[in-house]
Amino acid sequence: MKRIRFYVAMIAARSSVILLKLLGRNASHFPGVVALKICPQVLGYLEMPDKFVAITGTNGKTTTTNMIVDFLEAKNVSIVSNTSGSNIEGGIITSLLTSTSFFGKNKKDIAVFEVDEKITPYIFPYIQPDYLVVTNLYRDSYKRNAHVGYIVDILEQTIPKKSHLILNGDDVLASNLRKDNKRSTFSIAPQEFEEEIKDSIIQDAPYCPVCGDVLVYDFKRYHHIGVVHCNKCGYKTPEITYELKEITDTHLLLIEDGKSYEYKNKIRNITDNYNKLAAIAVLREIGYTHKEIADSFDKEAVKVVESRYDESLVNGKRIVSVLAKDQNPVANSRVYDFVRKQDDWGSMTIIFMNEDSTHSTEFGEVENTSWHYESDFEYLNDPRIKKIYCMGNRVLDFKTRLVLAGINPDIITLLEPADTIDIPFDTDSVVMLHDLTNLTHVKKFRAILESEAAK
């Protein structure tokens, strides 16, 4: 009977894929949802490739996944992934529909899936990753993930014993997951150009994970990321498998087993380099040489997704769009920190367009705006920032938080939600801080700004 339900689920789900394509719609997760409704155990019937890599964590999942997939595709590896779909149960099932026969037989060499942390209890009982990357663990949207301790508990309970963990060794929370599992770690050594950031509002790991005493941060990169030790029990940052020893504008120096390997580089942003290092660690663990990986990176076969970061220069004017996830305080803080450190951007206009508000159309939806008060808006209290525009339904909330951060209210302009934008390009740079839900607007506004700069 269960097998019959599976066949019915396949007919319905695959038919919905065809229908959505005829309607010009993206089949990212709906076919998988259809299959689940008919056969809740559908994942147990869909055959996986011999090798399965999963990427989870609070931030950086999509970028890291795309880097790995770009590399493997450049190597002509037969791969199934959810880079164009969602990272929840329905999206993963939809992706597997493309890699299996009608009867669920696998047709690919490797699977690389981005997996939402909270969905792991519904995924890992059926499909267990050979390699599991945890990019980092922070508190996220209250609506979705509550507190980071809640997510740590979920992962601790759901990570399979067979999975080889590839963990951020600089993250106290991530690096202590499932201590009995085989593991590799990646880390970025303190850099000459770095200043410690000890004033991050969010501090999620002040205590030793072994004895509970106060942790000593020998180097605090930001939040709870850094080098630590405990005076009471001797706990310290774990031994590192893959370490970025040096980051410059032109190269990365990576250390593995005491040997040095050089990669070309274009950006010193620590966040991007954590994602790149995680991707390198995965590719090394599944058997590729540093030369193969470096050659692919150097040829730009692997690059940061433009929906995350895009920069262009028109007549000497800089136009930048950066993903600043709505309701994610750590992601926003890291973006604000990045913006304030760009010494060559000159005078700046900031456009906040990263609100993901639905309260005007979905009256039963409850929004928690307290994430504003855990985001380090103070980092934007910079004399080079001449103008700030706030867009969306929550503009007064944004303005209130900006003023409380010490920013002059006279430079803040509130805009109603709109399909067009009329902002004079009278600073050296315009920086758009956006969410994944409004990429269409970002493209429109970028075109308008580029046209204005070209005059």
Image (cartoon, rainbow, N blue to C red):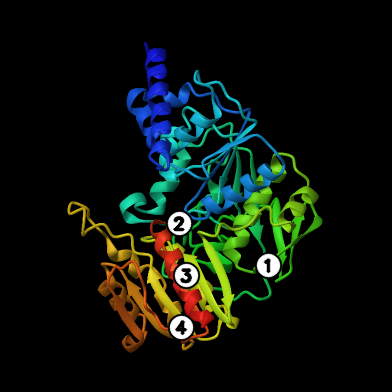
> Circle 4: is it few (<14), some (14-19), or many (20+) Cα within 10 Å?
some
Amino acid type, residue under disc 2 in the picture? Tyr
The residue pinned by badge 2 equals: 138
Judged by depth in the image, the label closer to the viewer, 1 or 4, is: 4
Please, what secondary structure does the residue beneath circle 1 have?
loop
- Give the labeled residue for mark 1: 266
Q: Nearer the viewer, residue 257 or 228?
A: 257
Distance CA(mark 4)–CA(mark 3): 12 Å
Query: Residue 83 or 139: which is nearer the viewer?
Result: 83
Task: Work out how far the residue at label 1 is from the one at label 4, CA to CA, in angstroms.
Answer: 27 Å
- Residue at label 3? 446
- N-terminal-most mark, 4 or 2: 2
Asked whether the residues under the numbered discs 4 and 2 touch, taking CB atoms below 8 Å apart as contact, a structural biologist would say no
**Residue type at numbered disc 1:** Lys
Q: From mark 4 to mark 2, how far is it between C-alphas?
A: 36 Å
**Are the residues at dot 4 and dot 3 in contact (C-beta closer than 8 Å)?**
no
* Front residue of this view, candidates 214 and 124: 124
Check disc 4 and report the residue beneath it. Answer: 425
SS at badge 2: loop
Point 42% across, 24% down: residue: 42
